[in-house]
Image (cartoon, grey):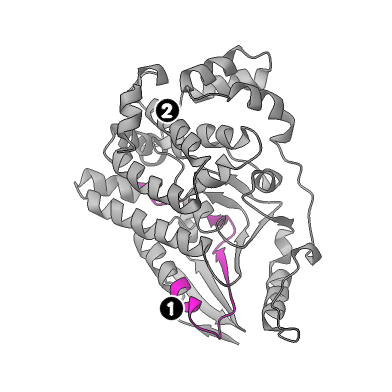
Amino acid sequence: MSQPTEAEDALVLRTVEDGLGVITLNRPRAINALNDEMVSIALTAVNAWRDQPEVRGVWIEGAGERGLCAGGDVRALRDAVMEDNVPLAMSFWAHEYALNYAIATYPKPYVAWMDGIVMGGGVGVSAHGAHRLVTERTSLAMPETIIGFFPDVGGLWFLANAPGQLGLHVALTGLPVNAGDAVLLGIADRIVPSEAKDEIKASLTHALNDDSDGNRRWDLDALPSVDVTPSLAEHRDWIDECYRGDDAATIIEALKAHENPTAQETGRLLATRSPHSIAITLEAFRRAESMTVRQVLDQDKVLGTAFIRHPDFLEGVRAQVVDKDRNPTWAAASVAEVSRAEVLAAFG
């Protein structure tokens, strides 16, 4: 039986359906972009359900047809900074990262329905879960360098543990990947048909309520599946070759000079991203290679303070989201102009 807990127009819907706590991000016109109220509601729900024995697992999905979540509401964050209300932005990230860690350490099955668009903060509320389901419609990205920010929500932990240098390629370019790539990168577990959501949710509920053998096991291998070829797989050679090292300028030049046309195009693309973002994201990625999820999220908090005060964030969101001219003017002309001292300063 479904037990609604708030009005249908709430930003986050929370119900308990036959022992399954269901969180629905309910801002479909904005592709369920997260604001502070939404992450706070979701955090309150998962924390409450953690201690309620009648809730045996959690399911998260997004309202509407476009996707789970397009990330954080960066327009609202930009407005807060322009109004000299930096604490508001920092409060949002504190709550968001607390939610990410609560999911990563959740003692009950946490299942993410990663259908459609899953970006930025959307990765944070899904990839840390125990069971991550993508579909043939999934388009996943950490696009932060496009707006003068960095891949946060603990996303660098997954990317730093991906095969070879694939994760660094995704982190620096901000380009979307498909469901096959999400599994390859370790951000998702299984590709299922989008039309099978109700069937899959019912099978989860049945598994959670089946106590006959003392286990509440859910067999993902028994779920219907879809084959989606990873788009990154065919580019692995030049990605691993060009993204080696710790110097962003060297990486970009290696890409531009490579014989593969896609590598050359990628080098030119990286040169258009925020130099400040590229340089610091590279450093953060290399540090994340030897960190735990908790340490990466703590690093995200520190970096957020540096980025929110940097002009590239305001300019990037303006160009991409507010004016939509896609023509930002970054503080530095290239990554070569971003000093090592500036990079290290961002880490406190």
- The residue at which mark 1 appears reads as 7
Q: Is residue 184 above or below residue 191?
A: above
User: Is residue 93 visible to the viewer in this orientation of the structure?
Assistant: yes
Q: Which residues are magenta?
A: 46-74
Please tell me whether residue 198 is drawn above or below residue 211 in the rendered image: above
Q: Nearer the viewer, residue 102 or 199?
A: 102
State yes or no: residue 257 in magenta.
no
Q: Residue at x 33, y 45 (%)?
A: 302
Identify residue type, mark 1: Ala
Packing grade of label 1 (10 A; few <14, some 14-19, many >=20) is few
In the structure shown, which secondary structural element does the residue marked by tag 2 occupy? Answer: helix
The location of residue 117, given as percent across then percent down, is 57, 51
Instruction: Report the side of 165 relative to 143 (left or right).
Output: right
Q: Position of residue 162 (x, y in %)?
A: 62, 41
Q: Residue furthest left?
A: 84
Q: Is residue 59 magenta?
A: yes
For the view shown, which residue lies furthest in the front direction? 290
Depth check, mark 1 against mark 2: the one in front is: 2
Expressed as whole percent of the image width and height from the top left, the position of residue 120 reads 49, 48
* Residue at image point 61% right, 70% down: 109
Marks 1 and 2 sit apart, C-alpha to C-alpha, by: 45 Å
